């Protein structure tokens, strides 16, 4: 059974990699590089991916935050500007809370990146840049479980690309973090 799980995960990652639109990916990286602040929003399992993204992007030296509560998401988004970026994560692309957040972002001119399942939805059509995942449902796992691996991989790829472009700033940021965290290792 464990082999089936691993093969299913591998298939999800391979299929997602095969449909990544390089131009959209480059545009997403450009948005992130220009951002004064990046915020990651997701609900449920996608909220966990948003927290992971925040954890990674803290290292870039770009101020970041992640929220998985709709009220906090709306409150925070209302304080952002066109110089910031919101990354919305929604497997279904039909989550009403994410669509409402997207509407707030549009009203304020905030650039948006959406990570969602490959399908035509109001979410995928509403974000400035859509990055897609592919996943299939199995007998004991919903497709949302497998899609989380693909979402995490897209976040990893965005993070690495931003990090490469911000190499010097990243070094300073990482040194500062390591000094702060070293206090916990004594």
Image (tube, rainbow, N blue to C red):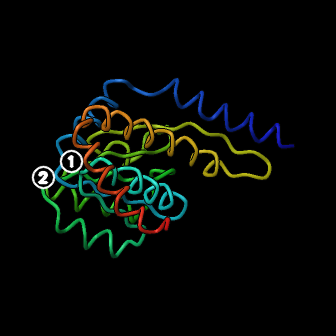
Which quadrant is home to the N terminus?
top right
> Can you say whether 45 is above or below 76 in the image?
above
In this figure, which residue is indicated by the disc labeled 1? 111
73 or 34: which is nearer to us?
A: 34
Residue sticking out furthest to the front: 186
Q: Residue at x 68, y 52 (%)?
A: 142
Q: Quadrant of residue 51?
A: bottom left
> Can you say whether 179 is above or below 150 in the image?
below
Across and down, in percent, residue 108 comes to: 14, 59
Q: Label 1, label 2: how many angstroms apart (C-alpha)?
A: 6 Å
186 or 19: which is nearer to us?
A: 186
Marks counted in the figure total 2
Q: Earlier in the sequence, mark 1 or mark 2?
A: 2
Across and down, in percent, residue 164 comes to: 31, 32
Q: Residue at x 22, y 62 (%)?
A: 104
Taking the image as shown, residue 180 lies to the left or right of residue 7, namely left
Q: Residue at x 13, y 58 (%)?
A: 81
Across and down, in percent, residue 150 comes to: 54, 40
In this figure, which residue is indicated by the disc labeled 2? 82
């Amino acid at each position: 059974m464990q082999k089936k799980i691993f093969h299913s995960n591998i298939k999800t990652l391979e299929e997602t990699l095969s449909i990544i639109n390089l131009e959209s990916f480059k545009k997403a990286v450009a948005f992130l590089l220009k951002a004064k602040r990046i915020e990651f929003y997701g609900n449920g399992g996608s909220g966990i991916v948003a927290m992971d993204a925040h954890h990674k992007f803290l290292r870039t030296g770009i101020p970041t935050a992640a929220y998985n509560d709709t009220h906090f998401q709306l409150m925070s988004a209302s304080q952002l500007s066109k110089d910031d970026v919101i990354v919305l994560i929604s497997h279904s692309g039909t989550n009403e809370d994410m669509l409402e957040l997207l509407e707030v972002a549009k009203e304020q001119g905030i650039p948006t990146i959406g990570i969602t399942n490959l399908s035509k939805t109001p979410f995928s059509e509403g974000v400035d840049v859509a990055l897609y995942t592919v996943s299939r449902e199995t007998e004991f796992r919903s497709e949302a479980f497998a899609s989380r691996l693909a979402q995490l991989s897209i976040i990893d790829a965005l993070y690495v690309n931003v990090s490469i472009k911000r190499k010097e700033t990243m070094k300073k940021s990482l040194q500062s973090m390591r000094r702060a965290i070293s206090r916990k290792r004594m």
